[in-house]
Image (spheres, helix red, strand yellow):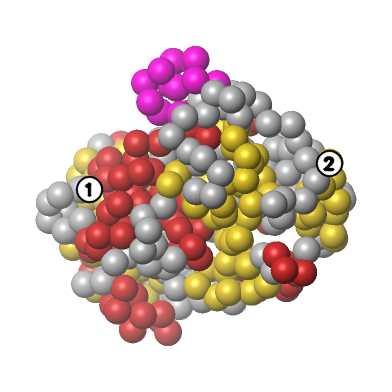
């Protein structure tokens, strides 16, 4: 049974703290499923969206896009899913299914991506959410719901570029930043057979980075420490944000090496090394549906799991504050107290 109204937490205007928000449940489209939410992770992107960093946020705004719950209702054209099924839903809740990217199975590049998020009209910090059933992923039975929630955004974000650029051999991979994304990237890269080096400005994270599967750790609080790794890495995933010593980073790449940006750091560097060493710099956004299914199965079979703090959904503002202050170790998942709602 689900409520006739959605009960969520919304920012009523740019940058505001969230407050309880009641709304009429959106109509189901023919391919849509309605999911009664049990868990929703807190991602940096939620905070960026509250601050309208991307310039596409409509208010009132209910964030939340690392969603796990049970299907309560399905549209007439949904196949393979039924009420009662447990599913995960990530940032992308739909796509046009017609543009050149969707037709290639690269739905994360859909030309209509701005309207594809599960946060339109209202996201996962709520009692329920709707999405196209083709973007609702049945979860491995043994996978705990909080783990699945985090994999729906943080997991796919790191797995997709590793799979595309580093899978299946002994490539030397560096992960910059040991946080919500980084600690998962280390686990996936290790399980994919890569030699993994964690690079972080927090030397106190060394022990944990090694426990997550890193073979080595470089303290980046002094960029000079990176010199030991000049011309060493095939692939470098940057999960950090803010201003980074890019020239020190780029020099650790082998010739024709690749830097992948996963967050939204400020980027500025001298182009000499880029040209002279024939480097590639690319971004990577989420992943397609096939990769999402593969990632869930891979995480389950290799025992990959994020470190999670659970907090009740009613403490959403405290959770956001912890993420903003980089205090979360390593990811926060909100739990819906359905009995109270
Ligand atoms: Zn996210
Ligand atoms: Zn499309």
Which residue is identified by label 1?
Answer: 166
- Residue 223 in percent (x, y) is at 39, 69
Instruction: Judge from the rendering whether residue 265 lies leftward or rightward of residue 115; answer left or right.
Output: left
Q: Is residue 100 magenta?
A: yes
- Reply above or below: 325 against 141: below
In the structure shown, which secondary structural element does the residue marked by tag 2 occupy?
strand
Determine whether label 2 and label 1 are within 8 Å by CB. Answer: no
Which residue ends up furthest to the left in the rendered image?
170
Crowd around label 2: few <14 · some 14–19 · many ≥20 (10 Å) = few
Residue at x 22%, y 48% (from the top left corner): 166
Residue at x 30%, y 45% (from the top left corner): 294
Instruction: Judge from the rendering whether residue 298 lies leftward or rightward of residue 106; answer left or right.
Output: left
- Residues drawn in magenta: 96-107
Q: Viewer-proximal residue, 3 or 321?
A: 3
Q: Is residue 292 magenta?
A: no
- Residue 184 in percent (x, y) is at 38, 63
Crowd around label 1: few <14 · some 14–19 · many ≥20 (10 Å) = many
Image disc number at residue 24: 2
Residue at x 25%, y 63% (from the top left corner): 302
Q: Viewer-proximal residue, 174 or 117?
A: 117
């Amino acid at each position: 049974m689900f409520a006739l109204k959605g009960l969520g937490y919304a920012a009523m205007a740019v940058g505001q703290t969230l407050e309880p928000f009641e709304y009429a449940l959106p109509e189901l489209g023919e391919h849509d499923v309605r999911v009664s939410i049990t868990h929703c992770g807190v991602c940096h992107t939620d905070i960026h969206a509250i601050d309208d960093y991307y310039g596409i946020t409509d208010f009132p705004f209910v964030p939340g896009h690392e969603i796990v719950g049970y299907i309560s209702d399905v549209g007439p054209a949904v196949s393979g899913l039924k009420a009662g099924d447990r599913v995960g839903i990530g940032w992308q809740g739909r796509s046009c299914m017609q543009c050149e990217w969707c037709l290639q199975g690269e739905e994360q590049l859909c030309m209509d991506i701005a309207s594809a998020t599960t946060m339109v009209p209202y996201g996962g910090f709520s009692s329920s959410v709707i999405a196209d059933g083709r973007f609702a992923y049945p979860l491995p039975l043994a996978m705990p719901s909080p783990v699945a929630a985090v994999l729906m955004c943080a997991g796919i974000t790191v797995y997709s570029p590793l799979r595309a650029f580093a899978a299946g051999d002994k490539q030397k991979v560096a992960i910059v930043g040991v946080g919500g994304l980084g600690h998962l990237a280390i686990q996936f890269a290790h399980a994919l057979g890569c030699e993994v080096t964690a690079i972080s400005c927090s030397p106190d994270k060394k022990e944990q980075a090694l426990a997550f599967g890193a073979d080595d750790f470089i303290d980046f609080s002094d960029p000079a420490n990176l010199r030991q790794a000049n011309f060493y890495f095939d692939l470098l995933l940057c999960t950090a944000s803010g201003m980074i010593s890019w020239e020190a980073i780029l020099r650790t790449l082998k010739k024709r090496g690749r830097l992948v940006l996963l967050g939204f750091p400020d980027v500025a560097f001298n182009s000499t090394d880029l040209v002279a060493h024939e480097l590639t710099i690319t971004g990577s956004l989420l992943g397609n549906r096939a990769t999402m299914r593969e990632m869930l199965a891979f995480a389950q079979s290799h025992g990959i799991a994020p470190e999670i703090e659970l907090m009740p959904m009613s403490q959403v503002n405290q959770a956001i504050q912890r993420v903003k202050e980089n205090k979360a170790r390593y990811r926060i998942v909100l739990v819906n107290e359905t009995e109270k709602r």
